[in-house]
Image (cartoon, coloured by chain):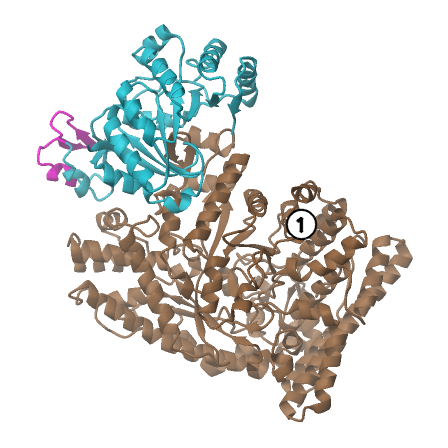
Chain colours: A brown, B cyan
Amino acid sequence: MEMELIRSITNLSCPERIRVLKEDMVSEPRYATIEQARIVTRSYQASEGKPRCIQRALALKAALEEIEIRIDPEERIVGNRTAGVRGGVVFPETGASWVDREFETLPTRPQDKFQVRQEDIDEFRRDILPYWKGRSLEDQVRQAVGPQVDAIGKVVKINQKDHSQGHICPNTKKWLALGPHGIWEQAQEHLKTVVDEKQRNFYKSVALSMEGACHFIRRYADLARSMYEETGKENLKEVAEVCAKLAKEPPETYHEAVQASWFLYVILQMEGNASSFSPGRMDQYLYPYYENSRKAGMTLADALELTECLWLKFNQLVYLRNSNSARYFAGFPIGFNVALGGQTEDGQDASNDLSYLFLQAQAHLLLPQPNLSLRMYKDSPQELLELASRVIGLGSGMPQVFNDEAVVPALESHGVSHADAMNYAIVGCVELTTHGNALAWSDAAMFNLLKALELTLHHGVDQLTGEKTGPDLGGLDTYATFEELEAAFAKQIDYFSDRMVECVTAVEGMHEQLLPTPFLSAVIDDCMSLGKDVTQGGAHYNFAGVQAIQVANVADSLAAIKQLVYDEKRIPAGKLLHALKTDFADDAVIRTMLLNKAPKYGNDIAWVDDLGAKWVNYFADRLKQYRNGRGGIYQMGLYTVSAHVPMGQNVAASADGRRSKDPLADGGVSAMYGRDTNGPTALLQSVAKLPFVKASNGTLLNMKFLPQFFQTDMGIHKFVNLLRAVCRLGISHIQFNVLNETDLRAAQKEPEKYRGLTVRVAGYTAYFTELAPDLQEEIIARKTYESA
Amino acid sequence: MNGTIFEVKRFAVHDGEGLRTTLFLKGCPLRCPWCQNPEGIDPAPALWYNPTVCLGCGGCAAACPNRALTLGGRIHVDRKTCTRCGTCVDRCPAGALSLCGREVSPRAAADLLLRDRAFFGTDGGVTLSGGEVLLQWEFAAEVLALCREEGVHTAIETSMQGPRAALETLLPVTDQFLVDIKLLDAEEHRRLLGVDNRLILDNYRFLCENGANVLTRTPLIPGYTDSENNIRSIARFIRLVNPEARYELLNFNPLCRSKYSALEQDYPVTGGALSPQELERFYTILAQEGIAHIIKE
């Protein structure tokens, strides 16, 4: 990239239109809405007896034709699945019972609140709920495997029980090349020759949903046209022209391609209401359209404004989860994950103007969506990493950084072709995927290894309930050696893995039966050529992902037991068991020893880190023995998003000194908070010992930085050096929390959780939490120090 | 020859180019009132006690073979009987007791420094600091030679208060010298720091004349070094010695006040860091004195 072009991009200011639209968006209250539920229920009632995929397509088509649409007079990119912005869509096909239970509490629940209208609640209970009782995914799953799911619930959380599986990166390139009309024609072509009834139904369902899509886009053209005639606003005229064209043919300009992409994601959400349909590598597939428009005279400022219009759109769709799920995935993440940079299939640098424009858009908006991800590799351009570092320093936590050097080999070792691995994208938060040809079922389950260890130490008895939920393989009082304990731990993991896979298979089967997704299947290869829905295994890649949770607590607990109980014999087994059972009520000294006298993961101490790596390896290898419901393999992930809090509530006191029900380590591969006291490089060296090649479902590492680090050119330069080291170390993901005042206030209140937070100045280093209050104030005021 | 160290700072971003690991050597011949690392002044290891995490369990007093510890609300250490054997440190469940300073071999020190090699890249490396590096120059030279053998960039932070032989030995194994000139007036230097600066300025000339890569730095300490006259004199001096000198003013950092309170000592410097305007005033002076390369963050 030419420096001059980069400078022109980074000098662009945030357009006035964007400021107005952003203000409109964030000031509008967020409501739960039953409009689509009403339409869909009516459609299902009218189509009883038809094959499920046809019923689903008809319901989607009806919604696309009838749902109320709205355009903000300032908009240039239009489309939403609700009339209001950020509406919480009630989606009875997957879950109606929980909505019934929780409807009134939506405005007051602790996480992810929505306003409600009483008339909606009444109508829902009168006209919608009765039809779905016993029919929804949620109820069917409960009838089929409810007791089995509950029996393992404290160790394994089975997901996708009351909503569609998302975490999918569609083939947007194909959608842009053909448009809905072109895909409709493809389906018709297949119908001319295909005789198999199931396949015919599939193609018919695709055609029906594409008819709905064309209609939906045309409705926006008509609305924009009439609004233009009323107001004379040029942007509305432009919108009307763009949409009118897209309703019948593929896009050619940047504006058209951005608009077409957005319609794809809106319609996917209307069909699936799932956590995350991700655009993936937008800077790659939008580039030809951008280039066309640039040649035809589009300015950089115009390209940025269109990009920022889309960025705002990514924030207008949110995802209504049940209250329990909202604790695991807080902040209604909907995971419009956009990847930028990285390499092409043949290993060339892939970054282009759009990569820089995307970063600049993030710098202007600093909103939670899109979930912006930088792909980094060993030869990433210095200027791209520098701009990304500056944007990271602004504190939105983005872009997060993925490392091709770790991700590509991980995918390849799980059966992904080299070309597909090089073209990987990210879905949801941090889950890895190929582009446009996978149903990776990334969130099949979360496996709480620390809970399995608790059962291993206590004869299979859950220390929170006193119930025996796992096999009695012995206890810390009976294992003569550390090796015996480890052997029992392995068996405990096996026991729950077997049961987990049975449940996941059952859930997948329910999705196949109840939730075929023809519109999505049309943009996932090889569904169209096979005539097979994604839920039936029509995708080229069929994975299922399970998260191993949580490596830091497992490593710290096992290290403390090994060193203090078995090697040094400083704590007798009986005493430790008593302390854990009683949550250290009368054992302050034992807890203090567990915390201080055994080394902790995250400090570059090989034998502790190796313990973590060993059990992550064990779990990954165990997963390899199973096949999922679509015939693909299982793969392991190492991330929790916000689940470290509720998953911690399931675990009694642990040998790492963690109190009963306290949160686990955050993120995924991070150290337990406050216990990585040797600084960021030591943490990274510890993390690098984990087998990233086996964590192909995705990993998550959080690091905290003070904002001062990013305020000088030298700081940016050194931060890029740090990124390059992460790249060399083969860590597959890292994201940076740049601490703000609130965070530092929290550190003052709970210093034990922030012990590793260091302040750096020349010839001197200090821990933030050990500074006197007045000095902490100086740092909070951001007066002086460049720090990390 | 073994050395005594008191801290390893990984991910050091202010002790030379790039990302570095800094090793702090114990013992210093100067007595700067504003010292940032007071725990580094005494060449011998010391027992540190942190009352805020102490459980008061008394395990340390019971374990001490010399009965140097007594319990009474907090732990009291009889510094005369304490042999710094570390028994109490091992025994303490809370980490309230620790030894500041330990003896290591040059190989062990180099291994500590090289742990973060993956981060050094092309411009980072290792830095020795203190205390005063020149007080343990034979050890320092061995450590740096070992790092050099591994192709790693080496730097030292020094006041240059040390024998010429030390610099002669360090010169071939040191890629960069970060040297402090704190005060130019010899009498003022003696009055405040305990020794005059003749040796320091001589050594400075020696380094510059022998082709060392030198970055000259002056810490701006309110009430001590931050007079216009002092900065102007230093600038004149270094320009005279080396017209191409690179010069950096280090803004005052009051964070070390916390260390003084842990040592139950008063910190004599009042006031905080200099404002950007005050810094700018000094930069103007440097420009007036013809400093070719003013290093700013």
Q: Residue B237 colored magenta?
A: no
- Mark 1 surroundings within 10 Å by alpha-carbon count, few (fewer than 14), some (14 through 19), many (20 or more): many
Residue at the location (55% across, 80% down)? Answer: A537
Kind of residue at disc 1: Leu
Judged from the image, the secondary structure of the residue bearing numbered disc 1 is helix
Examine the image and state in which quarter residue B214 appears: top left
- Residue at 56%, 63% in the rendered image: A346
Relative horizontal placement of residue A394, taking residue A204 as reference (left or right): left
Looking at the rendering, the stretch of residues picked out in magenta corresponds to: B59-83
Give the quarter of the figure containing the N terminus of chain B.
Answer: top left
Percent x, y of residue B14? 43, 32
Q: Is residue A592 left or right of residue A110?
A: left
Residue drawn 52% across the image and 66% down it: A421
Quick check: can you spot residue A403? yes
**Does the magenta portion include B65?**
yes
Q: Residue at x 69, y 44 (%)?
A: A5
Residue A196, relative to residue A545: is it above or below?
below
Residue A45 visible, this orientation:
no
Q: Nearer the viewer, residue B139 or A38?
A: B139
**Label 1 marks which chain's residue?**
A
In the image, residue A285 above or below residue A391: below
Rendering coords of residue B133 (x, y %): 29, 26
When the figure is inspected, residue A319 is found, relative to residue A380, above or below; the finding is below
Q: Position of residue B237 (x, y in %)?
A: 45, 12
Name the one closer to the observer, A73 or A268. A268
Look at the picture and state if A175 lies above or below A59: above
- Measuring from the top left, give residue B76's x and y in whole percent: 18, 29
Instruction: Classify residue B183 as left or right of residue A488.
Output: right
Q: Residue furthest front?
A: B210
What residue did someone put label 1 on?
Answer: A357
